[in-house]
Image (cartoon, rainbow, N blue to C red):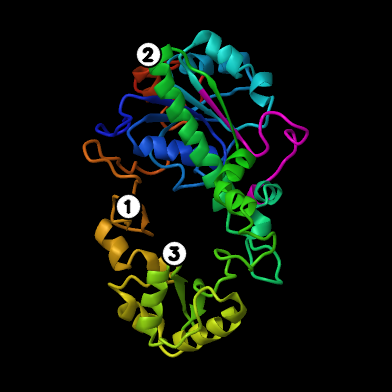
Amino acid sequence: MAAAAGGPLEGLRVLELAGLGPAPYTALLLAEMGADVVRVDRPGQPQDPPWPVLGRGRRSVLVDLKSGAGVEAFLGLADRADVLLEPYRPGVAERLGIGPDVCLRRNPRLVYGRVTGWGQTGPWSQMAGHDIDYIAVTGALHAIGRVGGPPQVPLNLLGDFAGGSMFLLAGVQAALWERERSGRGQVIDAAIVDGTASLTAFVHGVRAAGLWRDERGVNPLDTGAPYYDVYETADGEWMAVGAVEPRFFAALVRVLGLEGAPPQHDTARWPELRAVLAEAFAGRTRAEWTEIFAGTDACVAPVLSFAEAAEHPQLAARGVLVADEEGAGTPLPAPAPRFSRTPARRGGAAPTAGEHTAEVLREWGLKEPEPEGEAPRSWP
């Protein structure tokens, strides 16, 4: 079945070339917003999806892009698509015969979204890399960590999914809006290095103003300030403190009973303030502090694991993490953001490669390679 009706992108056809990381997550978001997303898988890859959560919400066709017939079959799908998501290294799609020049010549309204680590141009564009490499060269990785310590890796969220997926998504949606006026599609070059650099705009601004030093752990938002850090509790857990504004800091020290604490912005006394806060938080358990700070403006929250997050009362009340449709398994993130009239919906389980080949061909108006009722695993 196609995507569930009702999302804001209902009726949008998206063709996703199978890949890893940023492109699948963009495809997931488009599917949750109602788009009909069809993933093009390759013969010989594992039949079970390698990323069962990122692969949810779409259908799969199996196409051999190394054969002339397979390329023509793929181009038939691209002719009928609104958006194409391509995750290959620069030049690969062109060598296969499915690059943007070919696709847009046949379908001038196509939005051709390309996502790579280094971008389509530049001396490093043909090099392999991963999230950690891309955020390293933008300055972002250098800035994350404690004073005197090494850079700390923030999972692969900052580069792959924030700098890559979200900027690809923004580009796709902007190009679709522009197409409403021009009637023409275009190519999006979404590079993780570009997106990550854009995410650091705030830091570049305060650095230019002389309010940020190129050292880890000495700045207001990198654990340099004691009012923006984590503190261990009596049971070995942690509380996160983000009491940046003066009124929030005042609430923090009031709740902790530390009215005589050193002033918030006396940097010479920051070590003393940090010690006072650490001693206070060490006096109670995480659960106790969570209850004490609930309902205050002190900007304090418990540090929860992924397993614990679904049980937090705020997340539970909003259904931020919910069980799958069968009511079993690990809770999964609910679609975001939320729409007042056309709600997004979480799609079903990730398809196996080629599971929907015949179904998609029928719906997209393409010739079926096998008799009705038989679902071909590969096309053609």
Amino acid at the residue labelled 1? Asp
The correct choice, above or below, for 74 with respect to 289 in the image is above
Of residues 308 and 239, which is closer to you in this image? 239
Labelled pair 3, 2 in contact (Cβ < 8 Å):
no
Q: Which residue is mark 1?
A: 324
> Can the viewer see residue 340?
yes
Labelled pair 1, 3 in contact (Cβ < 8 Å):
no
Amino acid at the residue labelled 3? Phe
Of residues 301 and 55, which is closer to you in this image? 301
Q: Earlier in the sequence, mark 2 or mark 1?
A: 1
Give the distance between the C-alpha atoms of the residues marked 2 and 1, in whole angstroms. Answer: 32 Å
Residue 5 coordinates in the image, percent (x, y): 25, 31
Q: Residue at x 34, y 42 (%)?
A: 348
Residue 346 in the magenta stretch? The answer is no
Residue 99 coordinates in the image, percent (x, y): 61, 19
Q: Which residue is mark 3?
A: 306
The correct choice, above or below, for 234 with respect to 310 in the image is below
- In magenta, the rendered stretch is 112-132
Q: Secondary structure at mark 2?
A: loop
The label nearer to you, 1 versus 3, is 3
Residue 365's tag is: 2
Main SS class of the magenta portion in the image: loop
Q: Residue at x 68, y 62 (%)?
A: 151
Residue lying at the far right of the rendered structure: 123
Residue 32 coordinates in the image, percent (x, y): 35, 39
Residue 261 coordinates in the image, percent (x, y): 47, 85
> Can the viewer see residue 375?
no
Of residues 263 and 106, which is closer to you in this image? 263
